Amino acid sequence: MDSAQIDQVRRFNRTVTERVGVLHDHYLGRDRAIGEARLLWEIGEQGQDVRRLRERLGLDSGYVSRLLRSLEADGLVTVEPQPRDRRVRTVRLTDAGRAERAMLDARSEELAGSLLEPLNDAQRARLVSAMAEVDRLLTAGTVTLDTVDPGHPDARHCLRSYFTELRERFETGFDPVRSLLPDAGELTPPRGVFLVARLHGEPVGCAGLKLPAGAPAEIKRMWVAPQARRLGLGRRFLAELEARAEQHGCTLLRLDTNKALTAAIGLYHSYGFQEVPAFNDEPYAHHWFEKRITAPPPRSAP
Amino acid sequence: MDSAQIDQVRRFNRTVTERVGVLHDHYLGRDRAIGEARLLWEIGEQGQDVRRLRERLGLDSGYVSRLLRSLEADGLVTVEPQPRDRRVRTVRLTDAGRAERAMLDARSEELAGSLLEPLNDAQRARLVSAMAEVDRLLTAGTVTLDTVDPGHPDARHCLRSYFTELRERFETGFDPVRSLLPDAGELTPPRGVFLVARLHGEPVGCAGLKLPAGAPAEIKRMWVAPQARRLGLGRRFLAELEARAEQHGCTLLRLDTNKALTAAIGLYHSYGFQEVPAFNDEPYAHHWFEKRITAPPPRSAP
DNA sequence: CGATTTCTCTGACTAGAGTCAGAGAATGGA
DNA sequence: TCCATTCTCTGACTCTAGTCAGAGAAATCG
């Protein structure tokens, strides 16, 4: 990370917080305190439990309660106990609340527009695409990779989504029963690893690694949720699993895949995998890949 | 401005304010209130007059005074009357203040680093260059173009800088006396226009337009300060002057330039100017350009 | 010289954004 | 059934980040 990069990031931070900050106050802090506005926004069209609101915004329960009283007094929301659990209370927008929220929405659009407004068409296009890139990469930086048990709810959620996607994308469909699926123990230490990627706490991807004694390590069940694609997550999974395999003493990493998964095949190639003859009889596989693991060169002193 | 662009800008705003906002509080709001920290930062190494500080940060005089008392009590700054005008007071950092400021600086670097830290090298490079683009274009959007009298201090500042630059860049040097310079009246309405570009109130560029009766309009003295280049300002000057010329009823816009000014020459070409034979005997010119002004097609209804 | 203006400071306020310590109702488990 | 836990609410605070109205000293203008 060189200092020219750091300087550029600092310049960016300064410019953006100044410019967007000023506009933010101008457009959004106009008639309602921003605490209330944020809450109003987070309640959403369908309403929310107070509990979830608090979690989402990371606020003190007393504070949220007070904000809700204030919104209630202005006739923007109604708060009622949930029928199933009467300790929990559900907040819903009234029509006036919906109108207020729509106004906030419009203001936020105006804010965005005012950033583009002074630019010509070519500049606008460049700004928007640069913003998309910044957005994508900053988001990528907040994705966490955690080792979990394949039975964990987040892991199960990913696997379910993964199978659903395979069923849709394979021309033959996909039936887990016919496939060579590792049993849970094979993806649990010490015989393997299962990783889940999370974005803002939500699971958005998974990848498993089998570490059989005296045999090549094998990557299984790598999946990235549609909303988390283009964040370099696939590559990150591969790098992480490669590192785990190496720590484990493996010298060869391999995997099989279906011809429908073209993006994945491209990734394997670009990550240094070589296509090899079939090393198993997975019925859904068309391509088999392997990569020799070499110890990375020692890092130069920091 | 289409709605996909607006949406992307809004997504960008949300991601950036969340991510940078959280880190900002974490790193910079640690031991000193951000009001004080901002002030400490703005005082700078050489010190500042209280008056300028207030202007720069846009704060109430009472508030600044109170903040200064607090910094003084902590031994971070000294405040003394200015010798020339004892109403004005000058703030200077003490050694402790300098140390505190250095710490803030380091924190800001850490913040920047923490944005890059989770990314790999390729992603970092992409993020930094996208940030540079956003930075540049957002900055470009805050540059204002104002019509001023060529005798205005900001105009004079630009012209002085312009002449200095010509002197350095022309292989023959540059002596204003030998050049065909318009007299001030020629760049003042109704006989002409003089524009100054300002960024955060500082003049960062100028351009003049002669509007002689019954003759082609002529662009003179177009200059952009080094720190404001790559913001599309040259193009913006040309567009603005072209519009003025057209309003005035001109149908031809022309200008001359020196071969050393390659970037400008490129701009003229790309903006639709054609090189033509010399139309004057400006001793410092090597190229003469003109552009036919056509009324723009009527705008489709808004 | 006196009047006016400029600059900084002090005192008195306000609003926003929280924090903290319980109280009271509803629920779940032993 | 009772006890612990969960969830929301209230009351009493705190800290920032200001704003506003003058007061007093210094400089400037006529």
Image: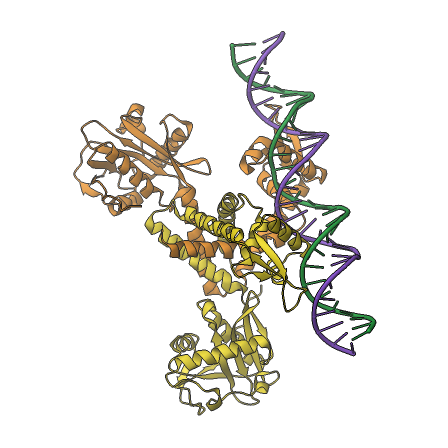
Chain colours: A yellow, B orange, C purple, D green
Q: Is residue A116 left or right of residue A16?
A: left
Can residue B275 be seen in this snapshot?
yes
User: In this view of the protein, which residue sits in the foreground, A44 or B116?
Assistant: A44
Name the residue at 62% across, 61% down.
Answer: A55
Q: How many marks?
A: 0
User: In this view of the protein, which residue sits in the foreground, A15 or C22?
Assistant: C22
Vertical relation: A34 (above or below) A149:
above
What percent of the width, then of the height, locates residue A57? 60, 58
Name the residue at 56% across, 38% down.
Answer: B57
- Which residue in the rendered view is the most extreme toward the left? B277
- Which residue in the rendered view is the most extreme toward the bottom? A281
Vertical relation: B171 (above or below) A291:
above
What percent of the width, then of the height, locates residue A269? 40, 77
What percent of the width, then of the height, locates residue A206? 52, 76
Q: Is residue A118 left or right of residue A19?
A: left
Q: Which image quarter: residue C25?
A: bottom right
What percent of the width, then of the height, locates residue B26? 62, 54
Name the residue at 64% across, 32% down.
Answer: B62
Q: Is residue A225 left or right of residue A52?
A: left
User: In this view of the protein, which residue sits in the foreground, A281 or B103?
Assistant: A281
